[in-house]
Amino acid sequence: MAKLRSGILGGISGKVGNVVGGRWRGIDYIRTKPAQVKNPNTEAQQKQRMRFKLVIQFLKKISPLVNVGFQNRGKNQTPQNAAMAYNLKQAITGEFPDMELDPAKIVFSEGSLQPAQGASMDTSVPGTVTISWISDTASANASESDGAMILIYNPAKDEVVYNMFGSTRGVESHEQSIPAHWA
């Protein structure tokens, strides 16, 4: 049963037959229930499903970073959807069925702040990764107090370590503990 919120011309909430009404992010919508598909597993569908699976599985692991990093993308798009759209286009490599994520192309934050310059990583101390960068605050919108979000991805183990509140730009480095089994 559907409910009319504001009379006959208002938004519909619920289901009537094969029509479903609802509200998402302040927008009233009506859609039909999906029809049964005769061949729901074509190669193109398998390819797209694999692309979605790769990106979704990764983004789930870092959802707190994504929720902050893509929060200003748009009113009608969630941070997760914005990150999904970007990474589906940019971070998938290979051809079906041998597709994978390219760690160098994954983006979990997008905005107007100047990115870190000259970033490097040192793994010489067991159980610790030291990330360093050059603080270039002479550019347009960089400040010594800008916070760094740290993400370390181990593709061999398909595991991540992240820190929402790493060092500031002015410190120019951050030491992050990593699991012992990553050695």
Image (cartoon, grey):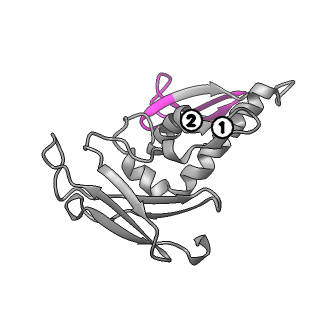
Quadrant placement of the C terminus: bottom right
Task: Say the numbered circle drawn on residue 51.
Answer: 1
User: Is residue 74 visible to us here?
Assistant: yes
- Name the outermost residue toward the front: 124
Tell me if residue 18 is in the magenta stretch.
Answer: yes
The residue carrying pointer 2 sits among few (fewer than 14), some (14 to 19) or many (20 or more) residues within 10 Å by Cα, namely: some
Q: Residue furthest left?
A: 138
Nearer to us in this view, 18 or 72: 72
Q: Tell me which segment is drawn in magenta.
A: 3-28
Amino acid carrying label 2: it is Leu
Q: Would you say the residues marked 1 and 2 are in contact, meaning their CB atoms lie under 8 Å apart?
A: yes
Residue with the most extreme right position:
38
Residue 132 in picture, x, y percent from top left: 32, 61
* Whether residue 151 is situated above or below residue 10 in the rendered picture: below
Give, as a three-letter code, the residue at label 1: Arg
At horizontal 48% and vertical 34% (from top left) the residue drawn is 5
Examine the rendered structure and indicate whether residue 11 appears above or below residue 100: above
Mark seen at residue 88: 2
Residue 125 coordinates in the image, percent (x, y): 45, 76
Along the line of sight, the residue nearer the viewer: 94 or 141: 94
Q: Position of residue 13 (x, y in %)?
A: 56, 36
